Amino acid sequence: MTVPPLKKIIGATLCTLVLGCAPKSTIDTLPFTKQSEKTTIEQLSDKEKTVLAKPIIQQETTVAQVYGEHIQYHDFSTMPVDELAKNAVPPPLDLQSYVDGTRLSSRNPKVSDAVALEKRFLEQAQKIRLWESNQVTSKIGELSVHDAILLARDIVTTKIVYFDVDGDKEFLKKNGAHLPRDTYYHLGQGDCDKYADLFILSFKTIKKYNPQLEQVYVTREIGENILPHAWNAIIIPTKEAVHITQVDPTFYDDKENVFDGENAFDAERGFHLPNNERLFVAKFYRGISDYSTSFKLYAATCSTQLLDSQDDLVNCFTDMAFTAYMSHNADGVAEANKRYDTLGITERKDTMLYYSFSIAVDERRRAAAETIAEQFSEKYSDSFWALIVDKRLKNTCWDCPPPW
């Protein structure tokens, strides 16, 4: 099956769709400064940047408490998934709720008839592997972890072809929009998020019949660069680390596009996810909504000493300001803006300034909010955020308590 040159399309639209738009428990074993204190790269000692000792697993604790920076990324093509699965342990509760989709509904794809979809998946597995119909589930149970993941992928990519189901007028007129995922599978057409969600669902079916997959999880992308695209992560927690890989079933199904050979399923470092490992870990914690931990990691990473591209610096400081805002850390937002200003970069400064405005509004600091609003009027009147700033300034109840 073939699909359009997706990477070129995504790359061409990235600046328009992403860069100008809004972005989407403490680590006890790391001696980071408290949330209310300013954290800079210079304030972190060498000890604070070292690798943590092996953690002790307790499922009731958070990922940050158990693993710290022990979040290890692998390319899928070289990831020892079978060995890792043998040593897998239940994830901490915050990660469990993420992989189960109980906190984020977007991680839990909706279907109209789960029983019928499972039947279709098993029928497709039978066709791919040429199994006898009465042996399908037992054969699935005998698969290695690696082969089970590939079968879940192939159940999707051998059935559907890429099509702009969210934008094609004829398709929408005939079938409608925002359909259950099993409907797209039945129609045999889907775009990137349909591929990704169907891969999650097909893996859940495979997992049901293969006990080796008990602590292996397939979810949507995490630790990723923000792109107008969708793909998947595979997560295996062990006693030593949370092991993660990212894979792209849509690009894998694109035989005319960017990837060739055995590694066609791998996500690409520098495109799907950052090259910098610490930046990936910070993004991972942002992905599971541990904004306090994520902020600390961004604060320790956002510097020209550790990041060698302007894009990485821009994204790092923007995320640092965002995670500070999300963890109600006004000093952190101010510190992100201050350090960013010293670089002399203006790209996305309006976004970072908006976080300063927003936290001033949330804390009911009217004078500070009005001062920032004046900066928007003078310097960023064409910004998307300027409209929101003006509206919030007029509509905020300044005598009301903070929203948290």
Image (spheres, rainbow, N blue to C red):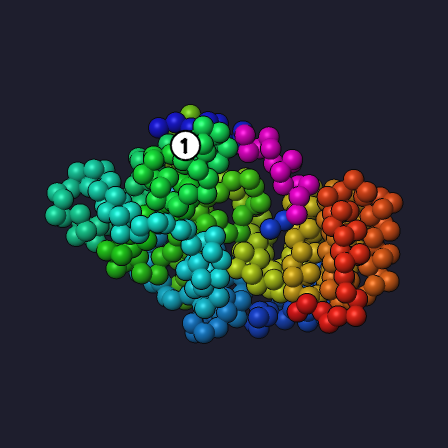
Residue 191: where, in percent of width, then height? 44, 36
Q: Nearer the viewer, residue 25 or 77?
A: 25
Who's the residue at 62% across and 38% down the image?
17
Q: Quadrant of the N terminus?
A: top left
Magenta region: which residues? 9-22
Is residue 70 left or right of 262 when viewed as pictured? right
Residue 241: where, in percent of width, then height? 45, 62
Q: Quadrant of the C terminus?
A: bottom right
How many numbered discs?
1
Is residue 200 left or right of 394 when viewed as pictured? left
Q: Which residue position is annotated with label 1?
A: 174
Residue 212: where, in percent of width, then height? 27, 58
Q: Nearer the viewer, residue 106 or 394?
A: 394
Q: Nearer the viewer, residue 68 or 225?
A: 225
The answer to if 404 sits in the magenta stretch is: no
Residue 311, placed above or below residue 244: above
For label 1, the crowd category at 10 Å Cα-Cα, with few meaning under 14, some 14 to 19 and many 20 or more, is few
Who's the residue at 77% across and 47% down the image?
386
Who's the residue at 63% across and 71% down the image?
31
Q: Amino acid at mark 1?
A: Lys
Magenta portion: prevailing SS class: helix
Who's the residue at 38% across and 56% down the image?
217
Q: Residue furthest top?
A: 256
The answer to if 16 sits in the magenta stretch is: yes
Residue 156: where, in percent of width, then height? 33, 40
Is residue 353 left or right of 76 when viewed as pictured? right
Is residue 96 left or right of 282 when viewed as pictured? left
Q: Residue furthest front?
A: 173
Residue 46, placed above or below residue 207: below
